[in-house]
Image: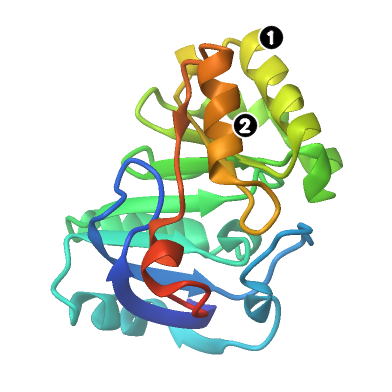
Amino acid sequence: MSLKITEIFYSIQGESAYVGQPTVFVRLTGCPMRCTYCDTAYAFHGGERMTLESILHQVESYGAQHVCVTGGEPLAQPACIELLSALCDRDFKVSLETGNAIDISKVDPRVYVVLDIKTPASGEEKNNRYDNIAKLKPSDALKFVICNEDDYQWAKNLVAQQALTKTAEVFFSPSAEELEPTQLADWIVEDRLSVRMQLQLHKVLWQNEAGR
């Protein structure tokens, strides 16, 4: 079994409940979506085909506890499911960043799933699989990247209509270079939302350096 890998690297987790944790990132190649704000378009094509064992060996070489499997869209490669379970079997704390266009039902329950719900301004709202929400664990996360006020209102209404804060932890993130973080914070405070605002810590630390 093998997967096409864009890169494997060691850095600081910039988002979600594991923010700030030293983490090994396994970035899989390929994505069926084209979000307007995508900052990893370099992972759409190319990559190197690696066996499962070679991936695990490289991940273990960093000596880290946390591993984040990301993309692109990692679940676009069916063998990602086996990779996630293999990482869990080796006692890593494993997170998965997925864009909500592919069924997550086969993801190992030991994995911390970050489900990215696509807002209208992303250009990919039509590809949301809302049935995935019911497959999340309370310990998982729902993420909304907010590009403008219309996105914010859309996300706020969806959170309320589906009582999403009772399903998993909900994160609102401002789209870099499209929405001022302070503006998003003001909206959240004004509306008394029970969501967690997050910035991308890796971009604060290293600006827009690719892969970090």
Q: Residue furthest left?
A: 63
Residue 205, position as x, y percentages in the image? 36, 68
Figure disc tally: 2
Q: Nearer the viewer, residue 196 or 63?
A: 196
Label 2 vs label 1: CA separation?
16 Å
What secondary structure is found at the residue carrying circle 2? helix
Left or right of 83? Residue 120 is: right
Screen quadrant of the C terminus = bottom left
Q: Residue at x 28, y 83 (%)?
A: 58
- Residue 113 appearing in the image: yes
Q: Residues within 10 Å of mark 2 (few under 14, many from 20)?
A: some
Q: Classify residue 110 as left or right of residue 132.
A: left
Q: Amino acid at mark 2?
A: Asn
Give residue 11's position: percent from left, percent from top: 30, 72
- Amino acid type, callout 1: Gln
> x, y percentage for residue 181?
55, 43
Judging by the rendered image, the residue that carries numbered circle 1 is 161
Q: Dot 1: what SS?
A: helix
Decide: is 34 above or below 19: below
Query: At 61% from the left edge and 46% from the top edge, which residue is drawn?
Result: 180
Which residue is label 2 attached to?
A: 132
